[in-house]
Every structure is written in C-alpha cells, then in structure tokens.
Image: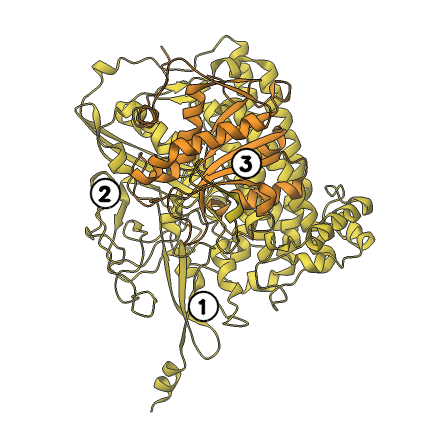
Chain colours: A yellow, B orange
C-alpha cells in the first residue's frame, strides 16, 4: 500500500446535523484527515421555495404583501425588494422622502439583526455562561473599562446584579437556553470575567433590540406584517411629518448607538484579541470572492455601501458590479432544471434524489435544496465582510474611517476580515456604520419637510403602464445582497424569483465542482476534536445563516401535556 | 379594526397574537383564528388582536407591552395527538424547553418565552395551540382535519378570554372562516391616491 493510500484510508467522514437545531435545515458533512484537518465539505440546506407559484397571476402591485411573508426575520427586506422590483419594471422612481423612510427602516434592521445575531444567536459559540458565574466582579469591571472607558453597564454593582440574575436562572434549571453542548471545549478562550461582561451585554441587548423594534414600528407600521410601502412610495406620511414621531425614533437610535459604541464594538475587540492567532492564521477563510451591490445613496449622492466585486482576495482591483452576470444553477441541487439560468427565466421544479441508505448525503451527486447562485460563473461571499472590504477599497466615505479605526485599534489588516472571527468584526463595524448613517438621513428628511417637500408617493396611472415588462431589485440587506426578479405579462405576474443572501453563502457545489462559500470556509480548518466540531459551527455561524422559516410549530416532544388537552363537550 | 399600538399610553392590557406563516398551509391556523375572532366578535373591555406572523425576537416586545397575552399557534406533541388536537396551556408548563438557537429563523415561541423571562417584566402568557396536519406545502389554506377542529379552537379561545373577565359578544354579521382565508389570498396593497 502506498503512503498516499494509507493516508486516504485514514480519512474520516463526519456528519454535523443539525448545524442548526432543526434537522435538515442546514447540515454539513466534512471529511477530515489524520491531522484532523478538514479536506472536503458539503453544505446542505432548505430554503423557501414556491414563492413564484403563489405570486403567479397576481396584480404586481400586491406582490410585496405576500413576498414579505417569505421570512419572518427578513420581512421588511423582502417587502422592500418586491416593491422595488415592480417599480424597476415600470420605471417608477419613488420620491426621495420615500427612499429615506425606507432607509430608516432598513438601516435600523441592519443594527437590530447584527446585534441579535451576535449576542443571542452566536456569542455562545465563544462565551461560556457557566464560567461567567465564577467571575470576580470587581476584576470584570476593571477589564470592561480597559476596552471602553465608559463601558456599558459595567460597574461592579451592575456586574454583580447580572451574575446573580444568571445564577438564579441557571439554578432554576433553565440553563437550556444557553446550553450549546461544547462548553469546556479547548477552543473557548475568554476568561470568566470576559464571559461575564459578554453575558451582561447579552441581557442588555435583549432590551436594546426590543427598543429598535419600536423605532422600526414608527415608520414600518404597528403590526409585524407592515403595509407602509406601496409601489411608488410609502404610505406613512403622517408619521413622517410628525416631529414627535421622528423624535421618538431618534431617541431610540441614539440609545442604541451608545450600546454599539460602548458594548458591541468593545466586546468584539475583546474576542478579536483573544482569537488573534486564529484570525492571523486565516481560520475560516474562503476563496476571497466578494460582492456588494452597494446602494443607500446619501444626501450627496454617494452610496453608503460601495458596489463592486473582488476576486480571490485581490483587494487592489475592484471590478464593477453588474447584476446581469447573476445566474443560478442546480447541478448539485435537488431540482430538475440544472443549467445556469438568469433568475428572470428560472423554474423551480423539485427533483429529489434522496440521501444514502445510511442517511448521509450523496456527496457525488445532488445534495441540497439550495441552488447555486454564481456571478460570472463564480461563487461569491456576501455580507458585512464583503461590504466592509469593498467599501474600504472604494473609499466609501462612511465605511473607510470606521474600518480603519477598527484595524488601528486591533492590529487587523483587511485580509483578516476574511476569516471566522473577522466576519463577526466586520458585522460589528457595519452595525456602527448603519446606525451613524441614520442620523444623516433623518437630517435630510427634516430639511426636506422644512422646505415643504412633503412628497412621498410618485403618481402613476396603472392602466397606461406597459402590460408586458420585467424588473429586478438588487440591494444590500443585513446578510448580503438580496435580489428579487419579476416578469410581468398582461399586467399580471408571469414569473418571480428571489435570490437571497444565504443562497449565495450556503450554496452547494456547481457543475464545475466549485465549492460554495460555507464549504470553502470550512475546508482547511483544523479541529481540536472531530467529535466536537466547534470550529466548523463557528465558521458557518459567522455568516449569520438565515434558512427556511417553515417550522414555527411549538415542539414539546417528550413532555406530557395530556391534562392540558382540550376536549369537545360530551366527548370526554 | 384596531391595530396594535406601540405607544405605551395606548397599550391595553390584553393581546391575542396569532403565530405562524400563512404561506405554509396549516401553519397559518393561529393567524386565521385571530382574524376570525376579530371579525366575528366585539370584546369589552377592548383587547388587541394581532397577526403575529413569524415574529421571532420581536415577540419579547409584545410580552412586555401587555399584562396578559394569549398566543394562538401550532404545536407538536406526541403520536397520541393527531392533527386537530387542541391544547390550552399556561406558558409556565413549557418553562425550560427553549434551548439554545443558532440562527435567526430558529427563534421560536419557546425561546422567546425563555428570553422574555430573562429580560423580565413578562406578561402572564397562555397558549392555545393545535396540532397541524400539513405544513410543507406552499398554499394559503387549511387542511380538512384542521378546518374541522377550528370551531372547537375558536370556542376554546373565546372561553379562555371569558375566564379572563372579557365579555365577548358575537357580531350580527358573521364572517366565515373560508372568507377569512380568502381575504388573505386576495389581499391588495393599500391605495395612495
């Protein structure tokens, strides 16, 4: 037997399912060699499909109301994309005030999504709650103030209160909320004091994110499924023109800004310092193809987010972004139509080829419900890291100084954002960028109103619009570039496709065998313990996955609830 | 129709919130039920009836804005609870079930109950939930078994509210469940003109 063969025979395959709790939602299979280095990876997941079926034949002006239900987390993003795609198809340009109001909602969502992702969904991959319970609060307060001189809610008394609250929660047997199964793993590096500071901000972030919901509701409407946007503009005119409402909104954003600057950014710097070696070693680095569609023009027309495309970490050359290069293909996905196709013409005909008999993915064939979006035939990484890198290189006036400041403070370089921890750092910077940019949009709106520019809707006569047309909306949302494509025939929806950020990042391989960004980020990782693949989870979670929102059932399997069952009268 | 107000001074103390995604068949049962009682009953004192959709983390905000919250949702229990089975639970019964979630779409009712408890100022929460038959197909409709169980579901909700001291009087003009579902299928964007 040759040495190569001997090595090959030592490869072992590991199934990580679920990466998320829900089985089949997102699963990763990896192959590791004798040094526990990942040599190949397959990411398989479910995404919403069927939107075109439900939208076909509808009045294009109504698509936003249905499309927003694609995802409960990203409601507003899909709502806006759908309305904008129809506006694009009809060449209707909403007034600037309407654009500003839409931005005030969208940017507040960037802040809220990033906060919630970091603290409530991802931080426990780094923070050990049990360890926090043994922290010395006096020492923890000192440490917190080393990271920010006005550290958020970090007096010794504050931290003691948090510790007590956590202890009582854990003592009441409610650790489940925080449990993630890997505590005590060698890759947990924060000290008990640092863990306590993080948990303190985890609790504070619960309050902050709730306040941001209220801010969004000021413009976005009162119910979770808003109706404030219409083709041509927004309907929240009275809210917009009411100084008290604007003031309420600003008050919350100001409070949030304090949290970002005095908690989120310092906490991120703390983690960056603890994991600097792994960042510098490029843990979780992908292929270096980044894409951003830019957008959110400021009052001087400069976009808040720069657009551009970077290939293979070659930061010095930023190519122009052109949406017509976007295709989706399904060679390795469970659909019949495999060839790369423009989303305008795509169909979504399922072709499920099942799993192997032992329940593993058929890694040689089709293995995911997620299609493979490509730009000029290449897989692309989207999201905060892409936007911060491209914005920095394009001299985006808001982004560059924030990224520079962070790099100066932490000793990171641009390439370092292309890593597991780096993606989280980029996300934190972006939360600050988005929050600060909001103030500029509000000032502009106030100026407009002051000079009696109160226009919020562009009039159009639907009957005289072209009966046959097509359009798309391509814009940046918290997890990356979102695009909706609509084809209209006889004034009704003829075809509809949504290509969401997670489709790009979680994409499977394609006809050429090119890995998707998750897969690329995982390959090359060295695992401390293949049975506890924390490094893989961290890499995947650093992308902030948002997959199928199909399962919202209260799952109480295993608990006896018979006494709470409701019986019709007389049937007992 | 009243909408949920965010400003504290306008906040009444009771909210009924339907949870689920109407695009996925029976998953929308809580939403349809909320809309059904909204269009068929008058309540004294007034209560808020909210189409919660798939609220995720935003649920916590509702828990903290009302004194009592009634959640209407789907539930998965065990093999002895076929589709159409209804449960009426104090949220405390579910305490400790919400474990760690890693992605935004996995924040579900159980997690929000735990996170809400951690955040404090929680409403008293009751859950009326039904076992669904089908939640995979993309269709705005209910399966036959769930439809059959809907009258009992509605009755359970009304009785629970009456237990809370709410007077529920049926409106003269009845709106059928079928037409409620149809309203969602035919919804139109508001007009600006």
Residue occupying the point 53% across, 53% down:
A559
| Quadrant hosting residue A292 | top left
The local crowd at label 1, few if under 14, some if 14 to 19, many if 20 or more residues have their Cα within 10 Å, is many
Q: Please state the horizontal and vertical placement of residue A429, each as a whole percent of the image.
A: 57, 43
**In which quarter of the view is residue A411 placed?**
bottom right
- The residue nearer to you, when weighing A290 against A50, is A50
Mark 2 lies on a secondary structure that is loop
Taking the image as shown, residue A59 lies to the left or right of residue A557, namely: left
Q: Quadrant of residue B116?
A: top right
For the C terminus of chain A, give its image quadrant. Answer: top left
How many badges with numbers are in the image?
3
Residue hosting label 3: B59
* Label 2 environment density (alpha carbons within 10 Å; few <14, some 14–19, many ≥20): some
Residue topped by disc 2: A342
Both labels 1 and 3 in a single chain: no
Kindly indicate whether the residue at mark 1 contacts the one at mark 2 (C-beta within 8 angstroms).
no
Q: Which mark is residue B184?
A: none
Along the viewing direction, whichever of A244 and A423 lies nearer the viewer = A244
Which chain letter matches label 2?
Answer: A
In the rendered view, tell whether residue A224 sits above or below residue A169.
above
Q: Where residue A481 sits in the image (x, y, percent)?
A: 39, 41
Q: Residue at x 50, y 53 (%)?
A: A542
Give the residue pinned by disc 1: A524
Q: Nearer the viewer, mark 3 or mark 2?
A: 3
**What is the x, y in percent for residue B127?**
53, 38
Q: Quadrant of the N terminus of chain A?
A: bottom left
For the residues labelled 2 and 1, the Cα–Cα distance comes to: 33 Å
Describe the element under mark 1 as helix, strand or loop. Answer: loop
Question: What is the CA distance from the residue labelled 3 to the residue labelled 2?
Answer: 38 Å
The chain ID associated with circle 1 is A
Rounded to the nearest angstrom, the CA distance separating label 1 from label 3 is 40 Å
x 57%, y 45%: residue: A428
């Amino acid at each position: 037997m040759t040495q190569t063969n001997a090595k090959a025979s030592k490869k072992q395959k590991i199934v990580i399912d679920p990466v998320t709790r829900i089985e089949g939602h997102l699963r990763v299979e990896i192959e590791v060699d004798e040094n526990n280095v990942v040599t190949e990876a397959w990411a398989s997941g479910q995404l919403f499909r069927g939107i075109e079926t439900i939208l076909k034949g509808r009045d294009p002006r109504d698509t936003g109301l249905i499309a927003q239900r694609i995802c409960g987390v990203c409601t507003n993003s899909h709502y806006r994309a759908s309305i904008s795609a129809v506006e694009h198809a009809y060449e209707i340009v909403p007034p600037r005030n309407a654009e500003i109001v839409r931005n005030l909602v969208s940017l507040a969502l960037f802040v809220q999504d990033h906060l919630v992702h970091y603290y409530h969904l991802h931080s426990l991959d780094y923070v050990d709650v049990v360890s926090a319970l043994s922290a010395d609060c006096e020492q923890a307060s000192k440490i917190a103030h080393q990271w920010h001189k006005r550290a958020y809610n970090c007096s010794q008394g504050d931290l003691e209160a948090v510790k007590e609250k956590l202890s009582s929660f854990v003592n009441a047997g409610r650790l489940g909320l925080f449990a993630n199964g890997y505590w005590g793993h060698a890759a947990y590096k924060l000290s008990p004091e640092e863990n306590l500071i993080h948990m303190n901000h985890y609790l504070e972030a619960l309050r902050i994110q709730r306040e941001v919901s209220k801010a969004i509701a000021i413009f976005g409407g009162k119910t979770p499924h808003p109706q404030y946007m219409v083709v041509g503009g927004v309907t929240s005119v009275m809210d917009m023109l009411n100084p008290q409402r604007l003031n309420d909104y600003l008050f919350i954003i100001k409070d949030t800004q304090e949290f970002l600057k005095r908690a989120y950014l310092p906490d991120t710097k703390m983690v960056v310092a603890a994991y600097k070696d792994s960042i510098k070693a490029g843990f979780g680095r992908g292929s270096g193809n980044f894409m951003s569609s830019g957008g959110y023009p400021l009052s001087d027309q400069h976009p808040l987010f720069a657009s551009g495309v970077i290939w293979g970490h070659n930061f010095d050359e930023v190519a122009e972004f052109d949406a017509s290069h976007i295709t989706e293909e399904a060679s390795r996905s469970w659909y019949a139509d495999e060839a790369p196709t423009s989303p305008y013409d795509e169909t979504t005909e399922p072709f499920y080829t099942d799993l192997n008999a032992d329940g593993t993915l058929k890694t040689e064939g089709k293995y995911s419900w997620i299609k493979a979006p490509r730009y000029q035939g290449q897989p692309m990484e989207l999201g905060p890291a892409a936007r911060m890198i491209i914005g920095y290189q394009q001299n985006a006036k808001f982004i560059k100084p924030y990224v520079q400041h962070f790099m100066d403070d932490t000793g990171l370089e641009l390439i370092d954002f292309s890593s597991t921890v780096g993606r989280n750092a980029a996300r934190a910077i972006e939360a600050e960028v988005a929050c600060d940019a909001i103030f500029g949009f509000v000032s502009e709106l106030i100026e407009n109103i002051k000079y009696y520019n109160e226009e919020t809707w562009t009039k159009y006569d639907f009957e005289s619009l072209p009966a046959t047309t097509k359009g798309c909306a391509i814009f940046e949302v918290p997890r990356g570039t979102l695009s909706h494509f609509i084809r209209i025939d006889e004034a009704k929806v003829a075809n509809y496709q949504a290509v969401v950020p997670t489709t790009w990042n979680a994409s499977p391989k394609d006809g050429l065998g090119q890995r998707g960004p998750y897969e690329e980020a995982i390959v090359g990782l060295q695992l401390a313990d293949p049975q506890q693949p924390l490094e893989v989870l961290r890499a995947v979670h650093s992308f902030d996955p948002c997959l199928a929102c199909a399962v919202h059932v209260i799952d109480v399997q295993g608990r006896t609830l018979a006494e709470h069952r409701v019986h019709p009268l007389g049937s007992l | 129709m009243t909408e949920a107000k965010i400003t504290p001074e306008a906040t009444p103390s009771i909210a009924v919130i339907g949870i689920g995604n109407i695009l996925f068949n029976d998953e929308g049962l809580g939403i349809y039920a909320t809309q059904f009682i909204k269009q068929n009953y008058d309540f004294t004192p007034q209560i808020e009836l909210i189409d919660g959709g798939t609220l995720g983390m935003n649920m916590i905000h509702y828990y903290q804005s009302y004194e009592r919250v009634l959640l209407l949702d789907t539930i998965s229990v065990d093999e002895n609870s076929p589709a159409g089975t209804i449960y009426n639970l104090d949220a405390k019964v579910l305490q400790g079930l919400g474990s760690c979630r890693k992605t935004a779409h996995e924040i579900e009712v159980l997690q929000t109950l735990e996170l809400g408890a951690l955040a404090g100022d929680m409403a008293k929460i009751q859950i009326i939930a039904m076992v669904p038959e089908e939640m995979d197909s993309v269709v705005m409709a209910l399966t036959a078994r769930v439809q059959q169980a809907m009258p009992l579901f509605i009755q359970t909700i009304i009785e629970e509210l009456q237990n809370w001291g709410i007077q529920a009087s049926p409106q003269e003009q009845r709106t059928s469940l079928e037409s409620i579902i149809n309203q969602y299928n035919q919804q139109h964007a508001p007009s600006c003109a």
